[in-house]
Image (cartoon, rainbow, N blue to C red):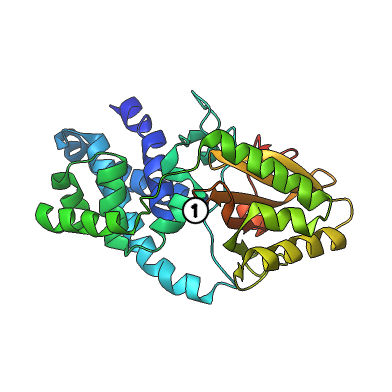
């Protein structure tokens, strides 16, 4: 049974990251769930028909508590709080490293756009939606996590679903091409070209956490973002831009002397122009990014 319990870790990390948006917090939640499992008397563990379901329920409850306290912490956070960005090699099959990023399966439920929407939900909505809609847990199991009736959990998931944008996504190939053109215009400090690539109502949100320079408020409007980007380019000689997957979709990584300083994720409008840019500069959130934007081999 022990091996089976250990084998649940990958699934639990995937659930916890989607619930919390933080690799470190996800790993802590899963470690705590395992600590509670091993603290049970052996006779009690033997009585549990499905250790995986037990661990999922406990991990979900821990994440629910973390989400409740995260509200207050994020109000004290310097500037905007964004989810941890995931490098492209995260989720490689049969990842055997101890790094939680290597355990993550990259799909549409970890794109930065999706995670940012999850942040707008109440903790209970987020747990109900992620467990049921993303991981297909039945509402009877979700009820055990939230300590509510299955019918109440169904309502929470429906409420959460209404927050998720239903617009048609831009084609994946189109995003890679747009991001490449943004990179070229940014490197050329070509404001006009950037304005053409940005939706007029585009919004750029940066997360420096008070540990790296970043705009404290969202920059709104294509022309404002274009000027902001070219201003950064002028102040940052020697900065190298690389096209890299971020949370499973085409993004950009900026590094200097081999150190990743910034990771940018994008979301496109229906016409293929950039509607949202999320810029993560907090070094604590970039620890799994080294060199060319591959995960740390820790």
Q: Going 39% across and 64% down the picture, which residue do you hit?
A: 120
Q: Residues within 10 Å of mark 1 (few under 14, many from 20)?
A: some
- Identity of the residue furthest to the top in this view: 94
Q: Nearer the viewer, residue 156 or 182?
A: 182
Q: Is residue 175 left or right of residue 106?
A: right
Element carrying mark 1:
loop
Between 294 and 216, the residue placed more toward the observer is 216
**What is the x, y in percent for residue 253?**
70, 46
* Horizontal relation, residue 160 to residue 25: left or right: left
Q: Please state, as top left, top right, bottom left or bottom right, where the C terminus lies in the image.
A: top right
Q: Is residue 111 above or below residue 10?
A: below
Name which quarter of the figure residue 278 lies in. Answer: bottom right
Above or below 77: residue 290:
above
- Going 64% across and 43% down the picture, which residue do you hit? 178
For disc 1, the marked residue is 22
Q: Residue at x 79, y 60 (%)?
A: 230
> Which image quarter is the N terminus in?
top left
Q: Is residue 139 above or below residue 73?
A: above
Residue 259 shows up from this direction: no
Q: How many marks?
A: 1
Residue 12's spot in the image, x, y percent?
Answer: 37, 40
Q: Looking at this view, is 136 or 23 the one in front? A: 136
Is residue 220 among what the camera can see? yes
Q: Position of residue 4 (x, y in %)?
A: 31, 27
Q: Residue 164: image x %, image y %?
A: 35, 54
Q: Residue furthest right?
A: 237
* Quadrant in the picture for residue 109: top left
- Seen in the image, is 11 located left or right of residue 250? left
């Amino acid at each position: 049974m022990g091996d089976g319990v250990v084998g649940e870790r990958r699934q639990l990390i995937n659930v916890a990251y989607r619930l919390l948006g933080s690799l470190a917090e996800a790993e802590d939640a899963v470690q705590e769930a395992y600590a509670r499992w091993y603290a049970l008397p052996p006779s009690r563990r033997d009585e549990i028909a499905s250790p995986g379901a037990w661990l999922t329920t406990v991990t979900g409850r821990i994440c629910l508590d973390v989400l409740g306290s995260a509200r207050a912490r994020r109000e004290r956070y310097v500037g905007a709080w964004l989810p941890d960005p995931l490098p492209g090699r995260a989720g490689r099959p049969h990842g055997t490293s101890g790094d939680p990023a290597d355990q993550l399966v990259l799909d549409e439920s970890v794109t930065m756009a999706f995670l940012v929407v999850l942040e707008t939900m109440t903790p209970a909505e987020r747990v109900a939606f992620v467990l049921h809609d993303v991981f297909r847990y039945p509402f009877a199991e979700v009820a055990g996590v939230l300590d509510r009736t299955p019918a109440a959990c169904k309502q929470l998931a429906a409420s959460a679903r209404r927050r998720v944008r239903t617009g048609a996504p831009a084609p994946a190939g189109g995003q890679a091409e747009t991001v490449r053109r943004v990179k070229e215009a940014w490197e050329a400090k070509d404001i006009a070209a950037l304005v053409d690539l940005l939706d007029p109502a585009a919004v750029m949100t940066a997360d420096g956490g008070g540990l790296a320079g970043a705009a404290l408020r969202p920059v709104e409007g294509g022309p404002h973002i274009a000027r902001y980007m070219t201003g950064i380019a002028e102040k940052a000689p020697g900065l190298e831009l690389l096209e890299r997957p971020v949370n499973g979709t085409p993004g950009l990584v900026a590094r200097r002397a081999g150190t990743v300083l910034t990771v940018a994720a994008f979301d496109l409008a229906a016409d293929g122009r950039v509607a949202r840019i999320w810029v993560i500069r907090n070094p604590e959130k970039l620890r799994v990014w080294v060199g060319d934007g591959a995960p740390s081999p820790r």
